[in-house]
Amino acid sequence: LARNKLGDHGIEAVCEAIRECKTLAELNLSENGAGTKAAESLAEAVPQSKSIRHLDLSWNQFSEEALALEHLGKMIAGSATLQHLDLSGNRMKVKDTGMMQKFSEGLKESKSLEQLRLKRMYFEDEELKGLAAGIAANRSLRFLDLTSTTVGKDDGMKHLCAALEENSTLETVLLTNNWIRDGSVKFFVEALKKSPALTYLDLEGNHFAEDEPVYLLQNA
């Protein structure tokens, strides 16, 4: 159902089908102009599904209101089957850090989510701090995509690496094209030493000095 201009009302109708269908495992609702009302409908419907495992909500319009984050957090927390969630491209410029905390609570409570894609969502420092708290406490995530989210600015990497140190399940983390600069490598070294499951870390397209990657490999 990708790229069908369903909007909030159309997705509300889809949510009725989600409640009724007992076999639906994958649903692609990307590029449908979904906003806060759609997020609210999904927060009610997805936890009622006993089968849905993959949900693509990328490139919608959840950035219009911070309240969408709260609804999506409830959806993640309430679903016992959702394993893969893609929110890429929603570019949430959340000024209400309390809403990011609500989304973070959803990550903390989730017991099924294994893959989370947040590519091109452009987090501010305080938003990333809230997200990192959820990542640190989560005990089901195995794959995290933070490509092109500007996490390399300000204290973003400090928050994220602290979360990686505490998380015990993440195996793959994508951090390509994030303006990560010299000085952040020390945080990665500590995270890699303390994260028991992390086996793949993608740092392509950042701004390290020539010797920084070598230092990372030698000391991690």
Image (cartoon, rainbow, N blue to C red):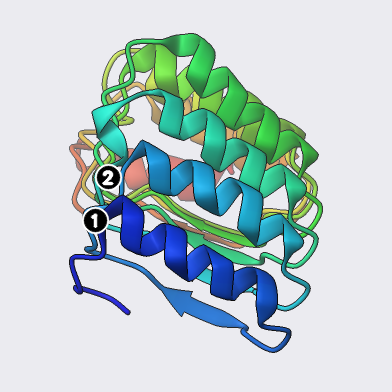
Residue type indicated by callout 2: Asn
Give the camera-side residue of 138 and 218: 138
Circle nearer the N terminus (1, 2): 1
Where residue 128 appears, as percent x and y from the top left, is: 44, 24
Residue at image x 75%, y 67%?
81
The quarter in which the C terminus is drawn is: top right
Regarding mark 1 in the picture, which secondary structure is present there?
loop
Give the camera-side residue of 144 and 104: 104
Regarding mark 2 in the picture, which secondary structure is present there?
loop
Which mark, residue 71? Answer: none
Measured Cα–Cα span from mark 1 to mark 2: 5 Å
Rendered view: 150 above or below 40: above
The quarter in which the N terminus is drawn is: bottom left
Residue at the spot of label 1: 59
Q: Are marks 1 and 2 in contact (CB under 8 Å)?
A: yes
Residue at image x 68%, y 77%?
20
Where residue 72 appears, as percent x and y from the top left, is: 53, 41
Rendered view: 154 above or below 144: above
* Badge 2 density bin: few <14, some 14–19, many ≥20, Cα 10 Å: many
Residue type indicated by callout 1: Trp
Rendered view: 156 above or below 38: above
- Give the quadrant of residue 106: top right
Residue at image x 64%, y 49%?
44
Q: Is residue 165 visible?
A: no
Rendered view: 26 above or below 119: below
Describe residue 172's horizontal placement relative to residue 83 as left or right: left
Which mark, residue 90? Answer: 2
